[in-house]
Image: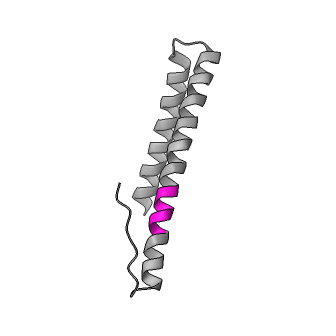
Amino acid sequence: MRRLLGFLIGIGTGALVGATVAILLTPESGKDLRSELRSRMDGFRRELQEASAQRRAELERQLEAMRNPHREIPLERN
């Protein structure tokens, strides 16, 4: 457990240092950089919400199947 905690702290510290260096050395202006970061975060948030909704629907179908084992529930295929 102690090794895992140390590893996670190292990852967090490395990510923070890397992000700080990237921001300081970027060739774009602050306004452009903030706009790009905001755009990427919005896209990431949208993808996360879509994945969450899909997973929730899948888990709800599985729960319904467990509650009613004699009734067949169609599974959606992507």
Pinpoint residue 39: horizontal percent, then vertical percent.
Answer: 57, 29
- On screen, 3 above or below 63? above
Query: Which residue is depicted at the point 37% across and 67% down?
Result: 75
Pinpoint residue 67: horizontal percent, then vertical percent.
Answer: 47, 84
Q: How did the renderer colour the structure?
A: one colour
Q: Is residue 60 left or right of residue 3?
A: right
Pinpoint residue 53: horizontal percent, then vertical percent.
Answer: 52, 56
- On screen, 52 above or below 73? above
The residue lying toward the viewer, choosing from 45 and 1, is: 45
The residue lying toward the viewer, choosing from 8 and 63, is: 63
Q: Which residues are magenta?
A: 53-59
Query: Which residue is depicted at the point 39% across and 88% down?
Result: 70
Which secondary structure is most common in the magenta stretch?
A: helix
The residue lying toward the viewer, choosing from 15 and 47, is: 47
Position of the N terminus by quadrant: bottom left
Q: Residue farthest to the bottom? A: 70
Query: Which residue is depicted at the point 47% across and 78% down?
Result: 64
User: Is 27 part of what is drawn in magenta?
Assistant: no
- Res 34 → quadrant: top right
- On screen, 74 above or below 7? below
Position of the C terminus by quadrant: bottom left
